[in-house]
């Protein structure tokens, strides 16, 4: 059973609209100079715990001005503590500027985790429960015959990920695709709103430039609702050209962190499958 | 409000209403009166004329024809000189000896509005509606005026011409909607022969759905419509189709670069009825297969629309009309991918004269708007379907009590059926076809509206509209906590009432005629809106859904007051006005940050509610006659919003808060053959949200946003030019250029990584319409 996610629908529609206008009306794009309001650098926290072996990583950085080439300040000497509510607590160690590792903490599905980050005078907090994993049954690929217009028009391959959705819970998924070890940029999400309890054949069409003999790895992340909401709203805020048509009122992603931090605290199990693309 | 209070207010109004004829009929009180009544039509084709004036100068009395060309004037017996006139037509003066009530039907002949250098004599001078009538905040443009304004691709576009008037602003290129006095695009009701049209454009705002060859009259009320109208906060656009030529067959049309149109009209029976069929289609898509780009070859891109109308008069007291419209837009990308959308409307009407003072119109109306999106791929065809269907029963009565007093009353019952969305899965791979629950609602109204000529200088238009809105099952209704999670569900059976709202909407306009050339007007009106449009995209993609008011989503209410000064110069050669308005809106709706509204059964949990208000001043100057004619409009205004959940409760500008808005239209008749026209628009850019910084997540650049709507798009301006060459009586050639000085107006500004160097982020402006020339050949047989 196939399912098209909302994100795919909206991105296909954006594309149709753009195509229609560009073909029909010779619209044009140009880079312009524009004045933007500035702000004090804001704290960015990327914290993730998975069920794979540790250490788990927390990255702390600051935001920068828009028209300055990327050079994000890191945040050192922060105190980071992660607790699971069974009594285990881990104080992270800074191994590189802005990058902190856990020590002995082992991520377990079903556990709730709390993270406390102290930077100068401010403490940031978030809580997140790690869902139980959904297993990948198998993955496959097919050669795409449809080279028609659409966001996947460059791709020669469509990947399929087969898995069984759980009927008793509301489930949220993220798919990460690695092409020869390199993570693809697309944020691919799905939820079981229209397909609860079904055996699913999830199609991944957005990964461009897959070619014959590529080694492709698909990771299935089972997310809780807060992490799903974060990634869903993150994709609208990305600077890779997806926005514009859809967002009348772009906003910062829905985060589970407090005190106006950017970023998120993610806790999710990962299941992996690999396949080689043959002819 | 409690039922007993309503009842008291309604009874009070009825008492006031019925006592006015007794109070009003001063100079003629007690005298026996007879009625002169009849129809006023256009001589050449028999079309009824609305708003034509019937005057008896000796008595200083007059009246105007209603929507169906009917007039009724009751005066004592005697010999009178009666003049019949209407703007754009030669006045007819005739002597009538009244010894009994008498029917007099009149045919008026067209007189072109712009006379070359000939001054208009006193007899031929038409009544100047803007001074005489108590209407304010209304714009009426005759189809003839529309034909002289250069519009995109040579098509004479109704909606685009109205957007050249003060107080009415286009939502932007590629967007079909418009803003009236700071209101949102869903606050405008568009009626085509009384049927609501929910999505009024083709090709994303490129063309409107109204073929101006089939249109007779259009009037736009900017928030102060009389009590017979209601349902939207900001404006009512009342469009009346032509009935069709009652005297002879005629074929007219135009062939243009992008679209062509054809209209056939003619009589049915001996001048008792007529038929009109009008159609339009684009064919630019016929050239697409010639493209070298494979993906473009498979594209489909077209729209069509048809207007049809038939009418027949049965004797002098009955007239039946049937009108219909069907239009579709199709965008296809081959392989079952694409979208289509369109409206279908039908109106059946029966005019009946109960007496020579009592005119009735009964209408049954059907309207449907729907769209379908297909995401086909090779093996399955999932589709989304959505739409809204209205069935409407309406009764309107005009009672011409005496020359000083006309009363209108009636009621309107609308059944709304909304399909918020259905996901179709192909049978082969089958499973969950998901249907979001249908929503059913009844929107009812009853109204009384009075026009009272209180004295020589003073005219009052006042009325009351009582509206009620009820939603009913079958449905299951969720309630939510602050985080938007469902906390409980209530089930309703088929026909069980879920929620009911009742509101009173008073309407009032007064006109003080200072002298023949000028008048002062003021008005107050309350409008209530029960249906709300949820936009799934800002680009005007036609995939919006309408939701009815509910426990959570209260009806929106707007109170508007306005004051105006209207003045004509140089024997009515120039028309000028200044209007000031203030509008306060309650229960305004907006979206939470990162709201998810597409195919969402719990869309109400994504909404926030707050206040809105708008105020401004509109200047207007028009030269009505002469080789050089045209108008200039300037609006200075603001539109603000405030919600607890947005921008920490601080007031912020609405997207459509455009401080300055200027429109300039100039036409020049060079000689017998050539007419030149031009229009220039300038407006402040929309309020938008731009990034204030950036940061990195998973190695990707993310835009950092600050307060909503704290930035501005660049100001928009554009010049359109046109020239029409009159080949002969029957045909003409029109050349036009859209965006003549090729201003690269911004359709969107997106903030994204540079294609070659992802460590650099830049602002990219997309301009939708460059300079676009076009030629259209128009003919009429």
Image: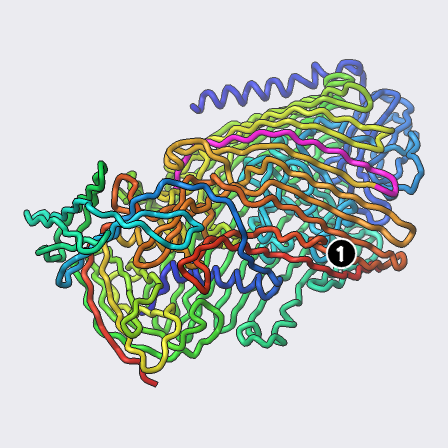
Can see residue A266? no
Q: Position of residue B546 (x, y in %)?
A: 47, 47
Q: Chain of mark 1?
A: B
Q: Nearer the viewer, residue B241 or B594?
A: B594
Residue B175 placement (x, y as % from top left)? 57, 51
Q: Residue at x 63, y 39 (%)?
A: B168
Return the x and y of residue B353 as percentages of the image width and height.
72, 37
| Residue B704 belongs to the span the image colors magenta | no
Q: Position of residue A221 (x, y in %)?
A: 23, 62
Q: Which SS class for mark 1?
A: strand
Q: Is residue B663 left or right of residue B79?
A: left
Quadrant housing residue B772? bottom right
Q: Residue at x 63, y 44 (%)?
A: B194
View extreme (left): residue: A87
Q: Quadrant of the N terminus of chain B?
A: top left
Tell me, yes or no, whether the highlighted magenta stretch contains residue B617.
yes
Q: Of A262 and A195, which appears nearest the observer?
A: A262
Residue position marked by numbered label 1 in the rendering: B736
Neighbours of disc 1 within 10 Å: few (<14), some (14-19), many (20+):
many
Please give the count of numbered marks on the rendered protein: 1
Q: Quadrant of residue B308?
A: bottom right
Magenta stretch in the rendered image: B607-628
In percent of the image, x 50 and y 66: which residue is there? B338
Image quarter in which the C terminus of chain B is found: bottom right
For this rendering, which residue is in front, B694 or B85?
A: B694
Q: Quadrant of residue B383?
A: bottom left
Q: Is residue B442 visible?
A: yes
């Amino acid at each position: 059973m196939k399912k098209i996610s909302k994100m795919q629908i909206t991105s296909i529609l954006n594309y149709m609209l753009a195509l229609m206008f560009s073909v029909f009306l010779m619209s044009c794009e140009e880079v312009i100079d524009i004045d933007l309001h500035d702000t004090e650098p804001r704290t960015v926290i990327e914290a993730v715990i998975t069920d794979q072996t540790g250490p788990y990583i927390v990255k702390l950085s600051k935001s920068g001005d828009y028209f300055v080439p990327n050079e994000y300040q890191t945040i050192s000497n922060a105190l980071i503590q992660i607790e699971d509510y069974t009594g285990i607590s881990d104080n992270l160690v800074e191994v590189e500027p802005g990058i902190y590792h856990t020590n002995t903490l082992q991520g377990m599905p079903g556990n709730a985790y709390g993270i406390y980050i102290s930077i100068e005078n401010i403490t940031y907090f978030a809580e997140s429960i790690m869902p139980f994993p959904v297993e990948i049954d198998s993955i496959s690929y097919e050669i795409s015959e449809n080279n028609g217009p659409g966001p996947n028009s460059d791709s020669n391959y469509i990947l399929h990920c087969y898995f069984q959705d759980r009927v008793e819970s509301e489930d949220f998924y993220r798919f990460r695709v690695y092409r020869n070890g390199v993570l693809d940029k697309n944020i691919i999400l799905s939820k079981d709103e229209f397909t609860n309890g079904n055996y699913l054949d999830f199609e991944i069409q957005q990964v461009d430039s897959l070619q014959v003999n590529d080694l492709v790895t698909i990771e299935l992340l089972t997310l809780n609702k807060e992490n799903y909401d974060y990634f869903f709203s993150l994709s609208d805020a990305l600077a890779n050209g997806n926005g514009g048509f859809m967002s009348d009122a772009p906003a910062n992603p829905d985060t589970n962190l407090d005190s106006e931090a950017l970023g998120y605290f993610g806790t999710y199990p990962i299941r992996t499958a690999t396949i080689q693309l043959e002819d | 409000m409690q039922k007993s209070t309503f009842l008291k207010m309604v009874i009070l109004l009825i008492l006031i209403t019925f006592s006015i004829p007794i109070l009003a009929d001063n100079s003629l009180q007690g005298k026996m009166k007879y009625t002169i009544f009849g129809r006023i039509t256009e001589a050449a084709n028999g079309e009824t004329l609305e708003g034509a004036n019937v005057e008896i100068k000796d008595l200083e009395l007059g009246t105007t024809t209603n929507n169906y060309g009917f007039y009724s004037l009751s005066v004592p017996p005697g010999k009178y000189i009666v003049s019949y006139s209407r703007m754009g037509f030669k006045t007819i003066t005739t002597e009538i000896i009244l010894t009994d009530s008498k029917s007099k039907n009149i045919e008026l002949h067209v007189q072109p509005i712009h006379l070359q250098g000939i001054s208009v004599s006193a007899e031929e001078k038409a009544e100047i509606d803007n001074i005489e009538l108590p209407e304010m905040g209304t714009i009426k443009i005759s189809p003839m005026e529309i034909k002289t304004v250069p519009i995109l691709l040579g098509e004479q576009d109704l909606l685009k011409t109205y957007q050249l008037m003060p107080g009415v602003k286009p939502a932007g290129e590629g967007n079909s909607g418009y803003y009236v006095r700071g209101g949102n695009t869903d606050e405008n009701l568009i009626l085509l022969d009384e049927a609501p049209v929910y999505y009024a454009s083709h090709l994303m705002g490129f063309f409107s759905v109204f073929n101006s060859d089939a249109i007779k009259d259009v009037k736009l009320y900017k928030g102060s419509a009389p009590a017979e109208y209601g349902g939207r906060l900001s404006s009512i656009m009342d469009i009346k189709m032509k009935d069709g030529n009652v005297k002879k067959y005629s074929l007219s049309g135009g062939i243009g670069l992008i679209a062509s149109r054809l209209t056939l009209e003619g009589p049915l029976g001996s001048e008792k009825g007529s038929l009109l069929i009008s159609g339009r289609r684009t064919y630019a898509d016929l050239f697409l297969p010639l493209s070298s780009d494979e993906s473009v070859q498979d594209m489909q891109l077209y729209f069509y629309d048809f207007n049809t109308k038939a009418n027949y008069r049965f004797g002098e007291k009955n007239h039946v009309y049937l009108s219909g419209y069907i239009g579709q837009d199709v965008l296809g990308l081959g392989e079952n991918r694409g979208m289509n959308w369109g409206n279908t409307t039908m109106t059946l009407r029966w005019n009946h004269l109960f007496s020579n003072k009592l005119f009735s119109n009964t209408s049954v109306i059907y309207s449907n708007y729907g769209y379908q999106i297909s995401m086909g791929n090779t093996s399955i065809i999932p589709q989304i379907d959505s739409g809204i269907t209205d069935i409407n029963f309406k009764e309107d009565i005009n009672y011409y009590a005496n020359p000083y007093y006309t009363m209108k009353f009636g009621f309107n019952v609308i059944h709304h059926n909304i399909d918020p969305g259905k996901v179709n899965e192909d049978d082969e791979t089958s499973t969950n076809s998901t249907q979001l629950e249908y929503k059913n609602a009844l929107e009812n109204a009853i109204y009384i509206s009075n026009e009272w000529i209180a004295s020589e200088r003073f005219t009052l238009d006042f009325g009351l509209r009582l509206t009620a809105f009820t939603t009913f099952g079958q449905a299951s209704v969720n309630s939510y906590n602050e985080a938007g999670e469902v906390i409980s569900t209530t089930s309703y059976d088929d026909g069980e009432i879920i929620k009911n709202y009742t509101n009173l909407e008073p309407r009032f306009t007064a006109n003080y005629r200072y002298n023949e050339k000028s008048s002062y007007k003021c008005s107050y009106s309350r409008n209530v809106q029960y249906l709300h449009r949820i936009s799934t995209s800002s680009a005007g993609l036609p995939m919006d859904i309408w939701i009815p008011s509910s426990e959570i989503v209260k009806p929106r209410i707007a109170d508007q007051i306005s004051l105006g000064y209207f003045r004509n110069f140089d024997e009515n050669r120039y028309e000028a006005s200044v209007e000031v308005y203030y509008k306060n809106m309650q229960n305004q709706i907006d979206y939470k940050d990162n709201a998810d509204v597409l195919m969402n059964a719990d869309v109400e949990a994504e909404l926030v509610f707050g206040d809105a208000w708008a105020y401004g001043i509109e200047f207007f100057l028009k030269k009505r006659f002469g080789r050089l004619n045209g108008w200039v409009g300037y609006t200075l205004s603001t539109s603000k919003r405030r919600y607890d959940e947005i921008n920490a409760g601080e007031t912020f500008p609405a997207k459509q808060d455009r401080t300055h808005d200027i429109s300039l239209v100039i036409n020049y008749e060079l000689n017998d053959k050539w007419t030149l026209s031009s229009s220039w628009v300038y407006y402040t850019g929309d309020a938008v949200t731009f990034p204030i910084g950036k940061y990195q997540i998973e190695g990707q650049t993310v835009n950092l946003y600050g307060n909503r709507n704290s930035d501005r798009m660049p100001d928009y301006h554009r010049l359109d030019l046109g020239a029409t060459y009159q080949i002969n009586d029957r045909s003409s050639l029109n050349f036009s250029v859209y965006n003549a000085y090729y201003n690269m107006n911004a359709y969107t500004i997106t903030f994204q990584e540079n294609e070659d160097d992802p460590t650099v982020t830049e602002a990219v402006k997309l301009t939708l319409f460059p300079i676009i020339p076009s030629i259209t050949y128009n003919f009429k047989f």
